[in-house]
Amino acid sequence: MTHYTPPFEIHVHGDVRLRPDVGFDALQDALKPLWKYAGARSLADGAASAFEDEPGIRFDAPAHMLQMCWTVTGDEDFRQALDEMCMSLNELADTGAPIEVTFYDTEFDEEDGDHSEESRDDFVMLFVGPTPAAIMQAQRDLLVEDVVALMERHFDGAELGGVVGEIDKLFTQRFDALVNSLELGRPPRGPGGSGHGGGGRRPRHLH
């Protein structure tokens, strides 16, 4: 009988700050797409990583923090599990947070001498948060961190305020466009009144 070997080792990495009222049961339900994909019957059963030196999935209850450094073997269909997990974590998150997912192609061998095939390694950056504004804030903060780290090779950090300001402008435009799209079709609140979009508070900016 032929045994199917999953073509990827998939690593999920990220820290998500949760609302203070979130307990283990709610988190277990939100992460069900992950531990069920791993063939486990509960979060406790599926929290261990495929690699012993990785901490796996941890819930730091006193700090209200979900910590993930977890690897599972799988295929492209794992992306559906990630989508379902993110939708559920949005309901539990206290702030916006990035989650890094790396697909390592286990069938690709750099030393086999055959260069006709390319590795199918892939990297995906996901974001979760309680509101669109919180998610955009996490995206903005990560972009600023990456851009500043890159440009500090050539410029002093104090010189990069203008660059950060331009990044803030881009995210402000995106946020305003989102709010405007949410307001389309919404009836006016009354004579002289003005409605407000459901996008939440505007993301914070550096000044």
Image (tube, rainbow, N blue to C red):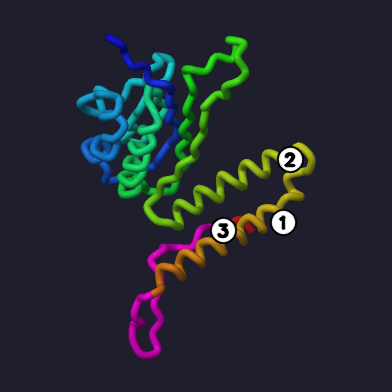
Magenta segment: 185-204
Relative height, residue 78 to residue 4 (above, below)? below
N-terminal-most mark, 2 or 3: 2
Task: Identify which residue is drawn at 60% across, 59% down.
Answer: 170
In the rendered picture of this protein, how many numbered marks are placed on residues? 3
Q: Residues within 10 Å of mark 3 (few under 14, many from 20)?
A: some
- Relative side of 184 to 144, left or right: left
Residue at mark 3: 171
How far from the left and from the top, in percent, is residue 85?
33, 40
Q: SS at mark 3?
A: helix
Tag 2 and tag 3, C-beta contact below 8 Å: no
Identify residue type, mark 2.
Answer: Glu
Identify residue type, mark 3.
Answer: Phe
Residue at mark 2: 152
**Disc 1 to disc 3, how far (Cα)?**
15 Å
Task: Identify which residue is drawn at 52% across, 27% down.
Answer: 121
Q: Kindly identify which numbered label has been placed on residue 32.
A: none
Relative height, residue 118 to residue 205 (above, below)? above
Residue at mark 1: 162
How far from the left and from the top, in percent, is residue 66?
36, 35
**Disc 2 to disc 3, how far (Cα)?**
22 Å
Q: Quadrant of the N terminus?
A: top left
